[in-house]
Image (spheres, grey):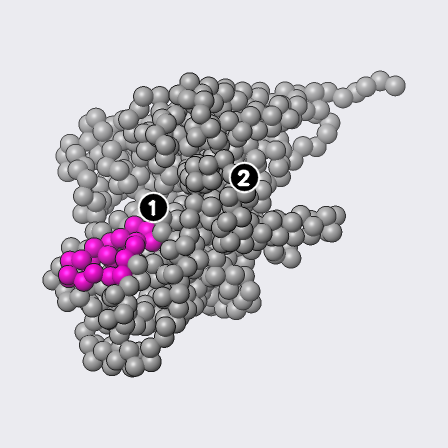
């Protein structure tokens, strides 16, 4: 468990190797830039910067890469708020309230709130990691298909909160998303819906699809408008409003803390990723809010919930990576590659023998979160000027960057074509009040939902009560039932 | 008492709903043609049936009484706005086609010029300058960032 002497050695190491700190600000700045570019994922950003670390010593290399990770985690929320394009899939839920806030002229508050939630969520998750890295890893190893099915089901229930004015249309949108998410070869080897197109064997690429559904479709609807924000006086950059947004995190402490816990647990589960945790955190916050109808219309609480969910996943996934040597996602896989490049093997023995090094990494990550504040504020200040750009220039630029970003995901035409197709679908859906956000949730979770359901079915061998043998799964299903039941009861109460 | 209710048919929504239902039926049947085992149809079959049932429930919403206010009606869209939106969609398709047949630079140049004009810029000098600068910055910038080949005609 917690080793005080190793911590003191770690603090001494940090204090004596000040040159490693030189890599933090450039790393965060690079991460912010790449994270804000639609289509360029956090994984890609870290993979692009990995070769730079070849000539660094081990500590500098890992600190640089984790700085890129920290910066990219927040960077994705900037275009999510300003132009409704999540820079990374971890910022999808940020668009639900961030963009409506920007349209109302509250882009400064939204960006400040996202920064605050990112910083505090990460600080809490890394602090917990400092004390509980081994127990978290022990818990992760017990997660099986039943628990993963529970997580996917929990996420799918979110569709119910995204139905908009028509529940029927909302569920059609969500259901369509689930079906689209199952296109391709499933885990058992059945190939469905590919129309003999080889690019569809792996399914519909989620990043181009969600960019088309959420962003391009919105931009198509703005071709006759002049600016993102109609009111000229609201198109200002205001440091005080950004700070107001940042401090709003403390007015929504409970939402932030719940999002952080959800993010940590989901982030620790290998292969799930921050794209799920930000959605779950958002839906949980909406269900429990005193004013759930305000969600989706531009409330800072929605932004805080989404960002705390995605940023705290970093600490969770680092726990799995350091303690088990299993990458929590693509980004931590790149960090593992950096470890391997320096001949370091992570896992249980690494934690035992090099606890001081583990503590150095964790403490440095906590410090990175605080350094993100000034670097992030400067980045926001420049990025926010996008609201002053006339749409006749912004629309073509954003659409081109989106298509290039989609090309960058796979290096072939599939991404770009997917974006175009889903832009049309997204515009039609928005026009006839079928919420594209519900389809996005279905698309992101549909494949995982089917895979875990099949695995659970196979492991149970037809035994309906198999899940009772999995206490973690039972606890999760009870939580889901309790949470859903509570929100239904609350709805009846208010009526 | 005379019944003065007038009904209007939202043809756009009706066609959209028919397309959704047709695609769902096609996908469901396609999945069934691969295999009828539970491991294949576990999610697809119930979700498809659910969507089709919901589509039948939504169908009456396409036939609305003109006197009853309907918050689910689409926003009014003028012919000019509709044509602009279709033009940008076609321009996006053209961009993707030109990128992979002639070159990324040519695709971006034409798309940025055409879309800027569609979105309201009428000054030829601004259109030309914007297109050239956009092409240079975006194409060159992405060539530095991504490792996949980006064939160009001029750059």
Local crowd size for mark 1, using a 10 Å CA cut-off: few (<14), some (14–19), many (≥20): many
Q: Residue at x 29, y 29 (%)?
A: A199
For marks 2 and 1, the one nearer the N-term is 1
Q: Nearer the viewer, residue A140 or A257?
A: A140
Residue A134 seen from this side: yes
Residue A27 at what x, y percent from top left? 25, 62
Magenta span includes B88: no
Name the residue that disc number 2 marks.
A464
Q: Residue at x 61, y 56 (%)?
A: A289
Q: Secondary structure at mark 2?
A: loop
The part of the chain drawn in magenta is A325-347
Q: Is residue B12 left or right of residue A63?
A: right
Q: Residue at x 23, y 40 (%)?
A: B135
Q: Nearer the viewer, residue A263 or B14?
A: A263
Confirm whether circles 2 and 1 share one chain. Answer: yes
Residue at mark 1: chain: A
Residue A215 at what x, y percent from top left? 42, 41
Name the residue that disc number 1 marks.
A38
Instruction: In the displayed orientation, state which residue is furthest to the right.
Output: B1
Residue at mark 2: chain: A
């Amino acid at each position: 468990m917690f080793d005080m002497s190793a911590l003191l050695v770690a603090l001494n190491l940090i204090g004596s190797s000040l040159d490693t700190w030189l890599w933090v600000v450039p790393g965060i700045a690079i991460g912010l830039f790449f994270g804000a570019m639609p289509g360029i994922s956090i994984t890609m950003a870290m993979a692009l910067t990995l070769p730079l670390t070849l000539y660094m010593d081990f500590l500098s290399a890992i600190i640089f890469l984790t700085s890129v990770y920290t910066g990219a985690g927040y960077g994705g929320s900037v275009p999510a708020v300003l132009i409704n394009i999540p820079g990374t899939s971890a910022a999808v839920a940020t668009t639900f309230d961030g963009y409506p806030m920007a349209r109302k002229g509250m882009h400064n508050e939204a960006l400040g709130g996202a920064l605050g939630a990112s910083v505090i969520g990460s600080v809490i998750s890394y602090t917990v990691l400092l004390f509980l890295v081994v127990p978290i890893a022990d818990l992760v190893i017990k997660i099986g298909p039943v628990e993963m099915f529970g997580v996917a089901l929990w996420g799918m229930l979110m569709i119910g909160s995204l139905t908009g004015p028509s529940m029927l249309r909302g569920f059609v949108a969500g259901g369509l998303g689930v079906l689209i998410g199952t296109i391709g070869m499933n885990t058992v080897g059945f190939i469905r819906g590919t129309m003999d197109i080889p690019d569809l064997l792996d399914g519909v690429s989620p990043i181009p699809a969600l960019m088309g559904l959420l962003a391009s479709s919105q931009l198509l609807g703005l071709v006759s408008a002049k600016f993102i924000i109609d009111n000229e006086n609201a198109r200002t950059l205001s440091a005080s409003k950004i700070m107001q947004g940042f401090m709003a995190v403390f007015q929504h402490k409970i939402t932030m803390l719940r999002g952080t816990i959800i993010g940590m647990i989901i982030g620790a589960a290998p292969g799930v990723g921050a794209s799920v945790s930000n959605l779950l955190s958002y839906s949980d916050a909406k269900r429990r809010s005193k004013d759930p109808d305000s969600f989706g219309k531009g409330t800072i609480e929605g932004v805080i919930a989404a960002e705390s969910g995605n940023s705290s996943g970093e600490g969770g996934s680092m726990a799995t990576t350091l303690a088990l040597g299993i990458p929590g996602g693509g980004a931590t896989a790149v960090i593992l590659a950096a470890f391997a490049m320096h001949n370091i093997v992570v896992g249980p023995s690494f934690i035992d023998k090099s606890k001081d090094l583990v503590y150095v990494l964790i403490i440095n990550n906590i410090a990175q979160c605080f350094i993100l504040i000034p670097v992030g504020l400067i980045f926001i200040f420049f990025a926010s000027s996008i609201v002053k750009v006339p749409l006749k220039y912004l629309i073509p630029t954003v659409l081109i960057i989106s298509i290039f970003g989609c090309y960058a995901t796979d290096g072939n035409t599939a991404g770009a074509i997917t974006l175009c197709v889903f832009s049309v679908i997204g515009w039609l859906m928005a026009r006839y009040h079928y919420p594209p956000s519900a389809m996005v949730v279905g698309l992101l979770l549909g494949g995982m939902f089917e895979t875990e359901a099949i695995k659970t079915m196979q492991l149970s061998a037809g035994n309906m009560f198999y899940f009772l043998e999995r206490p973690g799964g039972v606890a999760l299903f009870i939580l889901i039932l309790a949470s859903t039941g509570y929100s239904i009861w609350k709805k009846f109460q208010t009526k | 008492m005379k019944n003065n209710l007038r009904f209007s048919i939202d043809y756009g929504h009706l066609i959209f709903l028919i397309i959704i239902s047709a695609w769902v039926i096609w996908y469901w049947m396609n999945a069934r043609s691969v295999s009828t085992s539970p491991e294949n149809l576990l999610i697809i079959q119930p979700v498809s049936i659910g969507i089709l049932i919901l589509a039948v429930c939504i169908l009456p919403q396409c036939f609305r009484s003109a006197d009853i206010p309907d918050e689910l009606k689409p926003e009014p869209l003028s012919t000019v706005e509709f044509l602009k939106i279709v033009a940008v969609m076609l321009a996006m398709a053209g961009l993707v086609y030109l990128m992979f047949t002639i070159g990324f630079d040519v695709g971006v140049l034409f798309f940025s010029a055409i879309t800027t004009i569609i979105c309201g810029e009428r000054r030829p000098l601004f259109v030309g300058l914007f297109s050239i600068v956009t092409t240079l910055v975006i194409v060159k910038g992405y060539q530095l960032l991504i490792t996949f080949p980006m064939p160009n005609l001029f750059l």
